[in-house]
Image (tube, grey):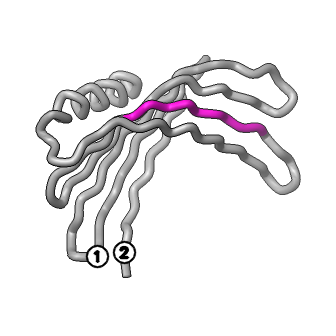
Amino acid sequence: MIKSLVFGAAAGALALAPLSATAGPYLNPEFNGATVGDNYLGGALNLDVGFEGGQGAYSYFVQGGPAIIMPNGSENEVEFAGKFGGSVAVAENVSVYGELSGVTGDDFSWGSKLGLKYGF
């Protein structure tokens, strides 16, 4: 169900792209590593292609691509990762943002973000 939610929302964002005042594609290669104390657990290299847009107080993005999963001490695996999110300006210098992400594999992994950004 979560896979359907993540990828269905991504498709919906792409369908709305022509309605955006500012929109465009981008590349987002990103490495994420993890440690606990002195123990390096491994990392993941995401090679995402994305699209972002927005109008007025609203902005959104959707991106995805191959993810090379590199656990420490184990074989590397190639999976698919994707994420989508957006933000809403709630005041002149304040916006609220959110993101849902997921990675395929033996067990589908997903994560979320919710935050507030204050510019000064």
Up-down: is 31 above or below 38? Answer: above
Say which element carries label 2: strand
- Identify which residue is drawn at 15% across, 34% down: 18
- Identify which residue is drawn at 19% across, 28% down: 15
Percent x, y of residue 37: 83, 56
Q: Which residue is mark 2?
A: 118
Image quarter where the N terminus lies is: top left
Percent x, y of residue 12: 22, 29
Relative horizontal placement of residue 55, taking residue 102 as reference (left or right): left
Disc 2/disc 1 C-alpha distance (Å): 6 Å
Q: Which residue is mark 1?
A: 93
Considering the whole magenta stretch, tell me its main secondary structure: strand
Q: Amino acid at mark 2?
A: Tyr
Q: Nearer the viewer, residue 91 or 4?
A: 91
Percent x, y of residue 86: 30, 49
Task: Judge the density around disc 2: few (<14), some (14-19), many (≥20) Cα neighbours within 10 Å.
Answer: few
Q: Are marks 2 and 1 in contact (CB under 8 Å)?
A: yes
